[in-house]
C-alpha cells in the first residue's frame, strides 16, 4: 500500500484489521450524525476491513460512502484520522506498516509546528491503543464521543496526545534498531498444512530462514527463505547450508534436537500430530530449553490422539 497522502474521504481509519472496537465505532457514528457543517460523510478504511460492516449494524446504523469523489452540501472541511497503534514488533517492521507510520508521523510533526494549510482539509488525528482500549492523551472526562469531537475540532490535537503517540512509535523504532539477528525456524512436517505454515512464517520480516523437515517438492519451489532440510545440515555447526544435499527424511526426536543445535534455530513449529505424541516438545524442552516450540506436550497430544482413536472405533462399531 502506498502512503495515503492523497486520500480525500472525511474519515480515514488505519490499522484495525478485523477488529472494530466499540469506542471507535461510537466515535465515528457520532461524527457522522453531527448536524453542523463539520459532519463527516465519507470513509476510507486502510487495513480496517471490519469497520464499515460493523458501523451498519445496531446500535450504530451508520452509513458512510467510501468513494472520495462523492460531493455533499455538508462536506466536512476537516479530515478525521483514527489510527490504531501496531500491536507487535513484527507488525511494525513490515513495509506496509512503515508507509503508514511515515504518514502518521508527518501529521504529528505538523501539529507540533502548529502549521496550517488552507488549501486542504484540516487533519485531526486520534490514536487508539488496542492493548489498553483507550484513545491516547484524551482525559477520561472527555471520553464521551461528542466531547472528544468538540475538543479536537475546537482545539486541535493536544500536545499530550501527539507526544504520547510519538513516544509509542519511538519505542518500536528502538526495538527495531536493536534487532541484531533474525530467527531460524525448524518446521516439522511435509503436507499441505505445513506448506501453508512455511509461507506464512517466511512472510515475517523477523524470520531469516524456514527449514522444513522433511518438507516437500512444493516447499522447494517456494524458494527464498524456505528450504527443505538436508543431511548436511546435521553436520554443520556454523550455518544452515550443509555440504551433503541429500534430503533429510527422518524427523525423530534425536534428529530434530541435532538439527536445532547445528542450525542455531530459535523456534520449532510442529505440524503433524505424530511428533507431538512422540514427545518432541518435551524432548526439546530438556535438550534445548532456550528454543521456543509451538505445539502441546506429549501428555496433551496423547489426550487428543486418544479422542481420535475413540471416535474412529465408535464409527467403525456403528457401521
Image (tube, rainbow, N blue to C red):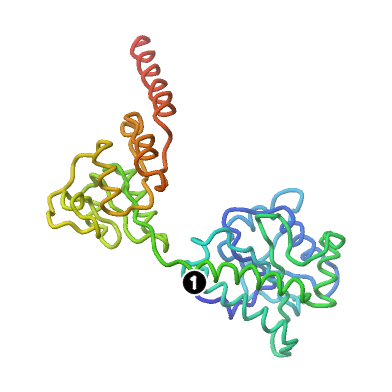
Q: Foreground: 2 or 173?
A: 173
Q: Residue sitting at 18 percent across and 51 percent down? A: 235
Few, some or many residues within 10 Å of mark 1 (<14, 14–19, 20+): few
Residue 65 placement (x, y as % from top left): 66, 66
Residue 75 placement (x, y as % from top left): 75, 76
Q: Residue sitting at 27 percent across and 58 percent down? A: 222
Q: Foreground: 156 or 176?
A: 176
Q: Is residue 172 above or below residue 26?
A: below
Q: Foreground: 119 or 284?
A: 284
Q: Which residue is mark 1?
A: 177
**Horizontal placement of 287 versus 29: left or right?**
left
Residue 3 placement (x, y as % from top left): 54, 77
Q: How many marks?
A: 1
Q: Is residue 124 above or below residue 130?
A: below
Quick one: quadrant of the C terminus? Answer: top left
Q: Quadrant of residue 117?
A: bottom right
**Horizontal placement of 158 versus 185: left or right?**
right
Residue 295 placement (x, y as % from top left): 41, 38
Q: Residue sitting at 77 percent across and 65 percent down? A: 32
Amino acid at each position: 500500500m502506498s502512503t495515503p497522502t492523497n486520500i480525500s474521504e472525511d474519515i480515514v481509519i488505519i490499522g484495525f484489521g478485523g477488529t472494530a472496537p466499540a469506542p471507535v465505532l461510537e466515535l465515528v457514528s457520532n461524527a457522522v450524525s453531527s448536524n453542523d457543517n463539520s459532519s463527516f460523510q465519507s470513509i476510507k478504511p486502510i487495513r480496517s476491513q471490519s469497520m464499515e460492516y460493523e458501523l451498519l449494524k445496531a446500535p450504530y446504523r451508520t452509513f458512510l460512502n467510501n468513494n472520495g469523489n462523492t460531493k455533499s452540501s455538508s462536506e466536512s472541511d476537516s479530515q478525521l484520522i483514527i489510527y490504531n497503534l501496531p500491536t507487535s514488533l513484527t507488525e511494525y517492521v513490515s513495509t506496509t506498516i512503515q508507509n503508514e507510520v511515515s504518514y502518521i508521523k508527518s501529521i504529528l510533526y505538523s501539529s507540533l509546528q502548529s502549521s496550517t494549510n488552507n488549501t486542504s482539509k484540516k487533519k485531526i488525528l486520534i490514536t487508539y491503543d488496542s492493548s489498553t482500549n483507550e484513545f491516547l492523551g484524551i482525559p477520561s472526562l472527555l471520553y464521551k464521543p461528542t466531547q472528544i469531537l468538540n475538543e479536537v475540532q475546537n482545539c486541535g490535537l493536544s500536545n499530550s496526545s501527539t507526544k504520547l503517540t510519538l513516544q509509542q512509535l519511538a519505542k518500536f523504532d528502538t526495538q527495531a534498531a536493536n534487532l541484531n539477528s533474525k530467527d531460524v525456524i525448524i518446521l516439522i512436517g511435509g503436507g499441505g498444512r505445513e506448506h501453508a505454515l512455511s509461507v506464512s512464517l517466511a512472510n515475517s520480516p523477523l524470520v531469516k530462514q524456514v527449514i522444513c523437515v522433511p518438507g516437500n517438492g512444493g516447499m522447494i519451489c517456494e524458494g527464498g527463505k524456505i528450504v527443505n532440510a538436508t543431511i548436511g545440515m546435521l553436520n554443520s555447526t556454523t550455518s544452515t547450508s550443509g555440504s551433503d544435499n541429500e534430503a533429510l527424511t527422518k524427523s525423530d526426536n534425536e534428529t530434530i534436537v541435532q538439527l536445532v543445535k547445528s542450525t542455531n534455530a530459535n523456534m520449532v513449529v510442529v505440524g503433524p500430530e505424530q511428533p507431538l505424541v512422540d514427545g518432541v516438545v518435551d524432548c526439546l524442552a530438556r535438550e534445548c530449553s532456550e528454543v521456543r516450540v509451538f505445539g502441546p506436550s506429549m501428555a496433551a497430544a496423547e489426550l487428543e490422539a486418544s479422542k481420535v482413536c475413540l471416535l474412529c472405533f465408535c464409527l467403525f462399531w456403528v457401521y
